[in-house]
Image (spheres, grey):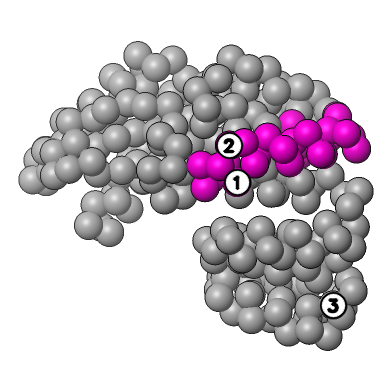
Amino acid sequence: MRRSDIDELEFLLDDDPAEAVRLARKIVAEIPADADAWGWLAEAHLAARDHEECLKATAEYVRRDPDWVPIYAMRCDVFAALGRFDAAAVEVEVGRAIDSGSPALLRSEAGLLSLKGEFDAADALYARAAQEDPEVPAPPRFDRQAVKAAVDRILREVVTKGLRLKAVIKEVPESGNARKVMTRELELADAKTLVVYVRNIEASMAAGDEIADFEEFFTDLLAELVDAN
């Protein structure tokens, strides 16, 4: 692949996922034997939230390069986001047979375990992945009582703006019920109930962050949610 194409794709993945898909498809048509081209197409579909097309592209990648473990980590993430936990676990097993210490695979398995409610096991894998790759530390974990107190305080403050919400604190969305199950951070269950998915918020924060940083991050998320509704 040309360096210029890679640079453009990296930009488009964040700026315009639909255009990233179009460009990646064009590149795949030009060099269909190139596994990396299919990998970029998978990334583009994932950025565009098209999970099924992402899975198809990753399958094409595996056909061309079956030994690259991060592709199995990606497939695990996508299957987990779709609530297909058994399929996600198969991807973990295949990747583990190639490299059981892959940080990407460890993090993906940790995400899968989180969605299954196995939080202690998930955190152990996050810690192991951080040991293998210190540049990607484990996500922070905040005291849940402190989280609830912070959220309630912020919601009391926004009452003055006409917004009356009661917070429900959950670790992660229930499997298969919420779009973007692995990344959804806040959700309006009804006109008066705000569901806060703490682990998904923590996943977006830095390892050294403290509860004050959580408060600031939550306030920004809440403002975005209110503007969108």
Q: Three-letter amino acid code at disc 3? A: Pro
Q: Residues within 10 Å of mark 1 (few under 14, many from 20)?
A: many
Residue lying at 60% horizontally and 46% vertically, measured from the top left = 79
Q: CA distance from mark 3 to mark 2?
A: 30 Å
User: What range of the chain is rendered magenta?
Assistant: 79-107
Q: Quick one: label 1 or label 3, which is nearer the N terminus?
A: 3
Q: Which residue is mark 1?
A: 79
Q: Which residue is mark 2?
A: 85
Task: Measuring from the top left, give residue 32's x and y in whole percent.
Answer: 84, 77
Q: Which residue is mark 3?
A: 32
Task: Measuring from the top left, give residue 165's x and y in whole percent.
Answer: 16, 36
Q: Is residue 204 magenta-colored?
A: no
Residue lying at 35% horizontally and 41% vertically, measured from the top left = 186
Please tell me whether mark 3 sits on a helix, a strand or a loop.
loop
Q: Residues within 10 Å of mark 3 (few under 14, many from 20)?
A: some
- Residue 205 in view, yes or no: no
Q: Quick one: label 3 or label 2, which is nearer the N terminus?
A: 3
